[in-house]
Image: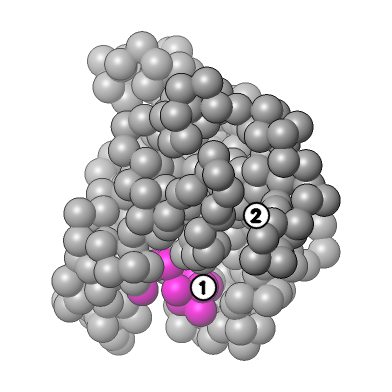
Amino acid sequence: MNGMVGAHENFESKAFTPSRVESPALTVSNAEMAAFYSSPRGNMSVADREQALFGNGFSFDQASDHYGTNEVIAQGFQLPNPKDWYKNEIEHKYRGKEESTMNKDIPAKAWDEAYKTFPQLKQLGEKDATRLMKAITANELEHFGPEDVGQDAGAGSGHGGALHKYSLGFAQISPDGLRDMARQFDAQVTKHHLGSNPLAAFEKLNNDELAKALVNPANVPLFVAAHVALDLQTLNRHKNEVTVNLEALGYFYNADMVYAATDTKHEHLMSKKDAQAKHIAFNPSLPTDEALKKSEHAANIRRWLGKEH
């Protein structure tokens, strides 16, 4: 298929639970924040987000100047710097804390159990498979944005029913995407290529229950391993077009290089961002040499694979 994949879906995009932050000019609840960031307004600029949340004329810079980080409010608590709070808890919640977050929130044995659950991963070996799963997860955490915070807040608070198309949790897989993976394993069981479906229990959950499962960090290794196992099978079918290695699999987890759906000869490789900006229907590219060279996602995966986890 010369650099393109067909029906296989590449699935893209810890609950947000800070207490209310209160001051004479700043009162925002978890529910309000979640609603804001799960709405289309989540694509607004930072300045526009500030004013939409806190009122016209508000800015974190002004709030910081007015209150100061050392002022103690009447209840005896130190007032947090609003700009730092927004940056650390909303804009890039896990950036710079990816590995410590994984170590704290994901049981160490879960990676080993995930590897053993999918026999396809033996092709990589446990050490490399685990390196890849952790690199993928760390990269998703690094790029965890405000819309992800809001969506996870909704999912974790029992309002995940409407989020079935949205990527959730550290693995950034949608409920619809997880069901699709489960169906692919079902098909392999039917054809006697697999003894049992490792995702069968999740396939039976409703949207709200599945959303909660996706934002549970303990499940992340299983879901990432399932994705990688299916991707590995796909790339093995294209060995004449790609080199099947960790970088290729990491890229394919969330392929960001595409061809326009009308580009049947696959002559013009473009980024997914460009295609989306131009409202062009597209198909993801296989991890060809050209795609890996141009892919921002592949570069990020290479960087994370180079670190010790």
Please state if 280 lies on the left or on the right of 112 as rendered. left
Residue 11 sits inside the magenta stretch: no
Q: Which residue is mark 1?
A: 217
Looking at the picture, does residue 251 appear above or below residue 216?
above
Residue plotted at (53% across, 64% down): 19
In the picture, the quarter occupied by the C terminus is bottom right
Q: Which residues are magenta?
A: 213-222
| Amino acid under disc 1 | Pro
Mark 2: few/some/many CA within 10 Å (<14, 14-19, 20+): many
Q: Are marks 1 and 2 in contact (CB under 8 Å)?
A: no
**Is 256 or 86 nearer to us in this picture?**
86
Residue 49 in picture, x, y percent from top left: 48, 30
Please state if 123 lies on the left or on the right of 197 as rendered. right
Looking at the picture, does residue 157 appear above or below residue 41?
below
Residue 214 sits inside the magenta stretch: yes
Mark 2 lies on a secondary structure that is loop
Residue plotted at (65% across, 48% down): 85
Query: Please, what is the dominant secondary structure of the magenta stretch?
Result: helix
**Is 22 or 32 nearer to us in this picture?**
22
**Is 63 or 266 nearer to us in this picture?**
63
**Number of the label disc, if any, that sits on residue 39:** none
Residue 259 in picture, x, y percent from top left: 39, 22
**Is 268 or 169 nearer to us in this picture?**
169
**Number of the label disc, if any, that sits on residue 94:** 2
| Amino acid under disc 2 | Tyr
Would you identify the image quadrant in which residue 274 lies? top left
Would you identify the image quadrant in which residue 180 lies? bottom left
Q: Nearer the viewer, mark 1 or mark 2?
A: 2
Residue plotted at (72% across, 46% down): 81
In the picture, the quarter occupied by the N terminus is top left
Mark 1 lies on a secondary structure that is helix
